[in-house]
Image (cartoon, rainbow, N blue to C red):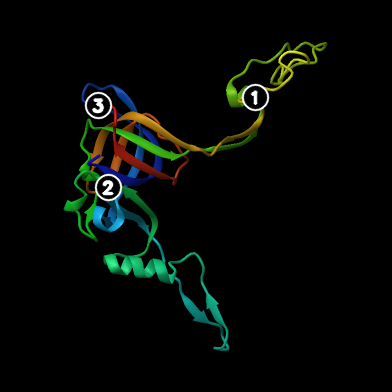
């Protein structure tokens, strides 16, 4: 792998190509990402590039009106994280991920990775946490069929037979049942980059990309492209 970047999902829209054909696209705010650490075989046992994405406020300590009680503002960068980012020469980042680049030795701490590493027509794989659907039944969760909807029917939206009494006398592992749906790591492969806005760090990807708006999306060059 030579190209990868972190992005946040902005939403979906549509554009027209040169032939006037409408193309549905997902807009991603891709980068800028900053290299926070270089992993080497000698030091870490493998070669990789660690990158940070989206600035994160540092922890602040202030005092109340009396000047005695300290007020600590949460959700900031703690001391170990601050030292790590200071060593790389970058500001505190909200997301930190590693990419195993083939040319990892060419990068240096604080190097910037922007959306222009991708070009129109590139094939990419998009990974994100899918939208959570909550607790759902077997029909919505697995696409199972419903029973008759007549008044006499006692079977409408149940998941069906779980395990007959004498044979097999058990519920098989993997049986489709109601439960928590969504909110899992999903990768969609072989998506096409339709347009790149290098000035604003935007990627327009043909079709849909997993995850809700504002979610973190990992974009990598396609393994099957």
The image quarter containing residue 152 is top right
Q: CA distance from mark 2 to mark 3?
A: 20 Å
Picture coordinates of residue 140 (x, y %)?
61, 25
The image quarter containing residue 203 is top left
Q: Which residue is mark 2?
A: 201
Picture coordinates of residue 168 (x, y %)?
71, 15
Front-most of residues 98 and 159: 98
Q: Secondary structure at mark 3?
A: loop
Mark 1 touches mark 3? (CB < 8 Å):
no
The image quarter containing residue 18 is top left
In front of the other: label 2 or label 3?
A: 2
Position of residue 37 in the picture relative to residue 70 (left or right)? left
In primary-sequence order, the first of circles 2 and 1 is 1
Front-most of residues 107 and 200: 107
Query: Where 165 sits versus 1, above or below?
Result: above
Q: Residue at x 66, y 26 (%)?
A: 177
Picture coordinates of residue 209 (x, y %)?
40, 34
Q: Secondary structure at mark 1?
A: helix
Number of marks in the rendered image: 3
Q: CA distance from mark 2 to mark 1?
A: 41 Å
In primary-sequence order, the first of circles 1 and 3 is 3
Q: Which residue is mark 3?
A: 17
In front of the other: label 1 or label 3?
A: 1
């Amino acid at each position: 792998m030579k190209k990868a970047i972190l992005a946040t999902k902005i939403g979906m829209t549509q554009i027209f190509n040169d032939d006037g054909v409408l193309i549905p696209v997902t807009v991603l705010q891709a980068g800028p990402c900053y290299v926070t650490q270089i992993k080497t075989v000698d030091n870490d046992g493998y070669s990789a590039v660690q990158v940070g994405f989206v600035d994160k406020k540092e922890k602040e300590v202030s005092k109340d009106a009396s000047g005695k009680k300290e007020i600590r503002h949460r959700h900031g960068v703690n001391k170990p994280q601050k030292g790590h980012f200071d060593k790389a020469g970058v500001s505190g980042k909200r997301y930190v991920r590693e990419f195993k680049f083939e040319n990892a030795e060419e990068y240096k701490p604080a190097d910037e990775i922007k959306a222009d590493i991708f070009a129109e027509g590139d094939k990419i794989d998009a990974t994100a946490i899918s939208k959570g659907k909550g607790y759902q039944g077997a029909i919505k969760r697995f696409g199972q069929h419903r029973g008759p909807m007549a008044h006499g029917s006692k079977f409408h939206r149940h998941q069906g037979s779980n395990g007959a009494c004498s044979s097999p006398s058990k519920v098989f592992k993997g049986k489709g049942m109601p439960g928590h749906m969504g909110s899992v790591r999903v990768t969609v492969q072989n998506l096409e980059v339709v347009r790149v806005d290098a000035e604003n760090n935007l990627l327009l990807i043909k079709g849909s990309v997993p995850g809700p708006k504002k979610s973190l999306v990992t974009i990598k060059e396609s393994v099957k492209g």
